Amino acid sequence: MKESFRKDALDYHRLPKPGKIAIKATKAMDTQRDLALAYSPGVAVPCEEIAADPLKALDYTSRGNVVAVISNGTAVLGLGDIGALASKPVMEGKAVLFKKFANIDSIDIEIDEKDPDALVETIARLEPSFGGINLEDIKAPECFEIEQRLKERMNIPVFHDDQHGTAIIVGAAMTNWLHHSGRKVEDIKLVCNGAGASAIACLNILVGIGVRKENITVCDRNGVIYEGRNEGMDPIKEQYARKTKLRTLTEAIKGADVFLGLSGPNAITGKEIKTMAAAPLIMALANPTPEIMPEEAREAKPDAIICTGRSDYPNQVNNVLCFPFLFRGALDVGATAINEDMKIACVKAIAELARKEASAEVAAVYSDEHLEFGPEYLIPKAFDPRLIIELPLAVAKAAMDSGVATRPITDWDAYKNTLQSYTYRTSMVMRPILDRAHLNPQRVCYCEGEEERILQAVQTVIDERLAKPILIGRRNVVEMRIKQLRLRMEIDKDFELVDPESDNRYRDYWTSYHEIMERRGITPAMARTAVRTNTTIIGALMVHKGDADAVICGTEGHFKKHMTDVVNILGLKPGVETAAAMNALMLDRGTYFFTDTQVNPDPSIAQISEMTLLAAEEIERFGIKPKIALLSHSNFGTHENQTAFKMRAAIEDLRQRAPSLEIEGEMHADAALSEKIRKDIMPNSKLTGEANLFVFPGIDSANISFNMVKVLGGGISIGPLLLGVSRPAHILTPSATARGIVNMSALASVAAQVEKECAAQKAAPKKTSKKKKVA
């Protein structure tokens, strides 16, 4: 290990404060009443409830989402028996991974005890505190006995990740190798080098997916494990003792289809690999140096598919693909154990995920890799956000089917939405919009239809039935990129394609555009060129002509240019002077909206009123009640300059136009966010709680504030949402992600629904009631 890397590792663990985990309160602790509820006397109430019904602990405490990571430090990574205390950085690291990947709170517990009886007794007594136990880095063969005894004694999941985590990923790799190679599992000849905890667990899983025991040969440091061997044997190894004349790894490997290495560095040579069957699977999983380096294995067997435990080679067998999500599913159904059915369900879910097209989020993280199912992509990547959805769903269903779930899931759609919220932080805020879009998808036109993020987003839009996509782009380019991205959608089947080079509506469109723009300097020749080359103009014209219900543009180019084209063609809503833009920002403390972040440098009083009303209407579609603050450097009349007067006048105008809105100003941002501060300076404020819509006096303050809070608060943004245009239209920014485009698609689809509903109401004949004659 390089000295510079050692220093980086030490600094990472030491700074800015020692360690990798901390405890954070989930309830407010700001007042005397909060303290009375959190501790005495209020805490007695849930205690009484739990005493009467132990399952209530899952309702009133964090137990159902807390896993203990427990080790005695006897088999730590490649370091061996370094003791309980020295293992603590590893256990803290495991706890961090639980939180990062599955939002599971975890506490590391290092126990200074090597006697299996005492260790079992200590761990078993911890059951009331935790929803699950993750055993880590406990040496074989004791680990088998310890886990088995704890599983028999405890009514919560107990899982030795060194055994079963590796086994599940190996099972997924084997499943996909069989799928890729077309071989039959019952015909596979497998040689395993290593007979420790991980190796035996891997073999058990492989037998569970169909590998025949009689086709497995296991070797350890003493050679082949065969019937009648006495040296270095134990009851666990005896399970895989074969009746054979083979005595060495060199002899056993000849003609083998699969090599599974869970032993040590350089345990097998290229010369031995050459004797394997054609196109073998080589899983050399010793870390950090595998049984054979991939380069040597490839030279010996060019047609081999190779997996290692290292991140710098393809097909990394990494336990983080498994254990967080396995526990997530187990905890969510109150499972009393993690059984074989749940492990096999996990194997299948991981394998199936690798065979799907890579999501946009994964492609962005691994931009230098070609993530297409095949020899170098048998196993999903650790940062694939679909793991938190697909794996817990599969595990939870298996737990219920196998009878170990104490809290069965009844609403699978709601559960899936909850899982999505762990990785797509916008999903819970967007849920009302997504649900409504799904009920009645509208025709949404995407102007940059050749762009990869658009194509990836459109695949999701199709899968989730959020809109009926129309893509603008050249047919040959779109076809090529769909193939490159391994997307499943097909032109003319799943979406409509508008090819500017050949669309038969070209003449109709350019003449319509010329009619709109002829007195704004656009000649017929310019109109013809624009409708061939400017996809934003084409998209806006589609909405104008009724060929689409909404338009989305902006992943390339400048916001202002796109907005000019959209507004020129579609116009503004009646009474609106100018368009505006609003951004939503999701922070840990809540969701907030900022306007105008993109359009108006110095909005007038009327424009501020208009954008506020439009923004409030948009926020209500999220199922959120708008609480509006008009911000200024003036705090309720403390200054008399132009911007303070503008915001003060806008407040009065808004109260007359929309008296039911909860709105206040002009005021400082801290007063908008703190009811206590506001009460001190304005006791009669009409705003309650904290504001969630911030209206700024100008574009500079709005844009600066939004971007600063986004970075400082680690926020996730939605938008910008275009306000005031007469027809549904949204302009993205070049930094938009595929998930952001999906969100905007749903917003556009819902806006089109609302537009049609309003039109239908206006067109409906008015009901007239006949007045009764008074006698």
Image (spheres, grey):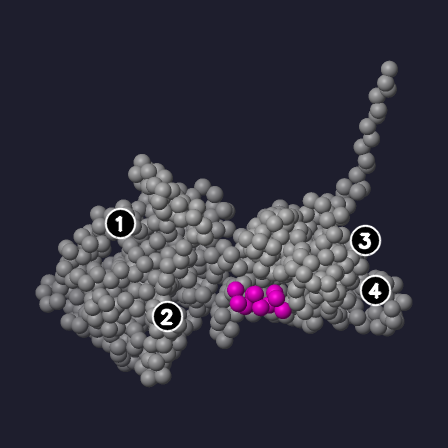
* Quarter placement of the N terminus: bottom left
Which of disc 4 and disc 1 is earlier in sequence?
A: 1
How packed mark 4 is, by other alpha carbons closer than 10 Å (few <14, some 14-19, many 20 or more), is many
Q: Whole-Å distance between the Cαs marked 1 and 4?
A: 72 Å
Q: Residue furthest bottom?
A: 3
What secondary structure predominates along the stretch shown in magenta?
Answer: helix
Residue annotated with mark 3: 574
Q: Whole-Å distance between the Cαs marked 1 and 2?
A: 31 Å
Disc 2 residue type?
Lys
Disc 3 residue type?
Pro
Q: Is residue 261 above or below residue 740?
A: below
Indicate the secondary structure of the residue bearing disc 3.
Answer: loop
Residue annotated with mark 4: 513
Disc ID at residue 17: 2
Closest to the observer, 95 or 518: 95
Q: Nearer the viewer, mark 2 or mark 4?
A: 2
Q: Whole-Å distance between the Cαs marked 2 and 3?
A: 57 Å
- From which residue to which does the magenta span run? 704-713
Instruction: Find out whether the residues at labels 4 and 3 contact each other: C-beta distance under 8 Å.
Output: no
Q: Residue at x 28, y 72 (%)?
A: 286
How packed mark 1 is, by other alpha carbons closer than 10 Å (few <14, some 14-19, many 20 or more), is some
Q: Whole-Å distance between the Cαs marked 2 and 4?
A: 62 Å
Which of disc 3 and disc 4 is earlier in sequence?
A: 4
Which of disc 3 and disc 2 is earlier in sequence?
A: 2
